[in-house]
Image (tube, rainbow, N blue to C red):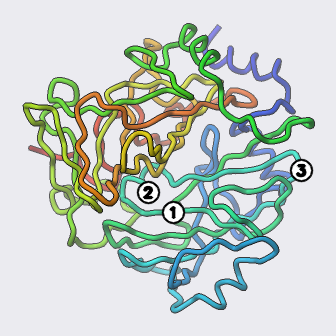
Amino acid sequence: MTGRETRENKQEKTGHDAPGLLPREDIEALIARKVISGDRAIEAAQIQPASLDLRLGAKAYRVRASFLTGRDRDVASRLEALTSDTVDLSGGGAVLERGCVYVVPLLESLALPASLSAAANPKSSTGRLDIFTRLITDGSEVFDHVARGYAGRLYAEVSPRSFSVRVHEGSKLNQIRFRRWAPDDAGTALGIDDRALSRSHGLMPLVDGDLNLRGGLILRVALSAATIGEIIGYKAQKHTDPVDVDRVGAYDPREFWEPIHARHDGRLILDPGEFYILASHERLHIPPELAAEMVPIDPAMGEFRVHYAGFFDPGFGSTPEGQPGARAVLEVRSHEVPFILEDGQVIGRLVYEKMAAAPRLLYGEGGVSNYQGQGLKLSKHFRAYEI
């Protein structure tokens, strides 16, 4: 029996109403039922193993500052009060300037039943370009979360931090995943506990080294040439041309990034306000029945933020041999003070969640998967860095 047949059998046994994150087959069913709809037809390429890519609409509204809608208020009314300029994204697109904040109505809308909620993350390529992107809904007091039973339009707050970027109507900067709740679930328990993770690791390795669990899988940063190579990271340059988010492999990385070479002492000093691309010491594998999310910041680990784009689909890092095969690429920004990282230092925590059913097509099995089997890797927009 093949791996895919095994997953399909498990899916049939799990049933169609099991709690957990919805696989692509259930997302397709939501689209067919108009629970998820679009101003333009939703494209098959938007549907990932456990998430849906969201598309920018035709207009972006430049606002003076980031905001939350607030209870009993809608985004449209807030935009009327806060918009300083309107940018047309149709046709050839438009440049969103570094350091500015924009709100963009998305092409997708939701009409969720009471049993479903949703959550969003920037896509991997968005995070690696340092485009701070968050989902906003009407009547919400938090970013990136859609309440059970929500009906209405979705909006993206977009703020390029390192590079100005050209975006277009239909560009995909963030993704949304859907969570089915059990009827008696109060909505508090989301992650898988460490004991269950340890059992999963025994069945199928989650990492290629020691399993270090503390409310999720602890990841360490790779800063030595022996682990990651002579170049152990990249630092964003300050003054560059804009990056078109829809162009793949179009840019010379030397025009946008400074390579960081390994030091003999395995250290890296993070400068306040600078943006870095680094990689985890561990190689990962996300089993078919699980998905994972990187905790974006943990004050106990230091004064820096790690991993703006934190969602890992089922199947990420899989190899034909069944061993973990991809590093987590880390988007890192230091805060108020310089901070020293050392090779092997704890830098992030991966929290796992159960799928309602294993998707029939895992990450890397269908369509284009730009980051399967990755080591230290810039976003898909850049050609490979040549020393």
Task: Give the spatial CA distance, label 2 vs label 3.
Answer: 31 Å
At which x and y percent is residue 266? 15, 32
Q: Locate the N terminus and report the quarter of the image it occupies.
A: top right
Q: Is residue 346 left or right of residue 385?
A: right
Q: Image point 43% across, 19% down: which residue?
A: 207
Image marks 2 and 3: residues in contact by CB distance under 8 Å: no
- Amino acid found under the numbered disc labelled 2: Thr
Q: In this figure, which residue is indicated by the disc labeled 2? A: 126
At which x and y percent is residue 289? 65, 24
Image marks 1 and 2: residues in contact by CB distance under 8 Å: yes
Q: Is residue 188 left or right of residue 17?
A: left
Nearer the camera: disc 1 or disc 2: 1
SS class of the residue under badge 3? Answer: loop
SS class of the residue under badge 2? Answer: helix
Callout count:
3
SS class of the residue under badge 1? Answer: strand
Q: In this figure, which residue is indicated by the disc labeled 3? A: 114
- Amino acid found under the numbered disc labelled 1: Thr
- Tell me which numbered mark, 1 or 2, is placed earlier along the sequence: 2
Q: Image point 22% across, 56% down: which residue?
A: 271
